[in-house]
Amino acid sequence: RRTRLISYAALGILVGIATIMYVPRLGSASASTGVLWELEAIAAVIIGGTVLKGGFGRVWGTVIGVLILSLIGNILNLTDFVSPYLNGAIQGVIIILAVILQRERKAAT
């Protein structure tokens, strides 16, 4: 119970720091700022190799997942291949593919 309280307090402090750093960059803030960021975080962790059903993951795997997602997002935005509004859908497809690959890898072992 104490660990959960400390985790929530630390998260609140980190969100406050992130907000202080992000708002000047945009020049404003709104309630919709950060929409789909949680999907991006989940996708990065899954692409990094963390199994959805539990277990453990590696920090470097998550960092690689973040780099892959950033690269894909930047390529899609710079090439105008798809609408920027579809980035969330593409991330969802990436999550589904990563989960399918995890299941196939687990079934093979």
Image (cartoon, rainbow, N blue to C red):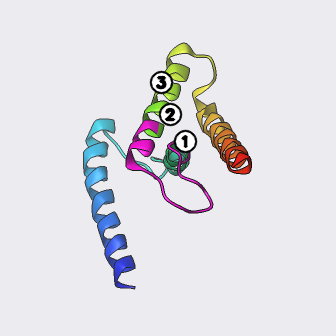
Q: Relative to residue 9, is residue 86 depicted above or below?
A: above
Question: 5 left or right of 69?
Answer: left
Label 2 neighbourhood size at 10 Å, few (<14), some (14-19), many (20+)? some
Q: Which residue is found at the position 48% from the left and 39% from the top?
A: 65
Q: Nearer the viewer, residue 107 or 46?
A: 107
Indicate the amino acid at tag 2.
Answer: Leu
Q: Nearer the viewer, residue 56 or 43?
A: 56
Q: Pointers 1 and 3 in contact (CB under 8 A)?
A: no
Residue 29 at what x, y percent from top left? Answer: 37, 47
Q: Nearer the viewer, residue 39 or 102?
A: 102
Mark linked to residue 69:
2
Residue 18 at what x, y percent from top left? Answer: 30, 51
Q: Pointers 2 and 1 in contact (CB under 8 A)?
A: yes
How much space separates mark 2 and mark 3, taking CA atoms? 8 Å
Label 1 neighbourhood size at 10 Å, few (<14), some (14-19), many (20+)? many
Residue segment shown in magenta: 46-64
Question: 38 left or right of 21?
Answer: right
Classify mark 2: helix, strand or loop. helix
Residue 73 at what x, y percent from top left? Answer: 51, 28
Indicate the amino acid at tag 3.
Answer: Asn
Q: Quadrant of residue 95?
A: top right
Q: Which residue is found at the position 31% from the left and 51% from the top?
A: 19
Specify whether residue 80 is painted magenta: no
Q: Relative to residue 4, is residue 96 depicted above or below?
A: above
Classify mark 1: helix, strand or loop. helix
Task: Check disc 3 and report the residue beneath it.
Answer: 74
Q: Earlier in the sequence, mark 2 or mark 1?
A: 1
Query: Farthest residue in the front direction?
Result: 109
Task: Check disc 1 and report the residue beneath it.
Answer: 47
Residue 88 at what x, y percent from top left? Answer: 60, 39
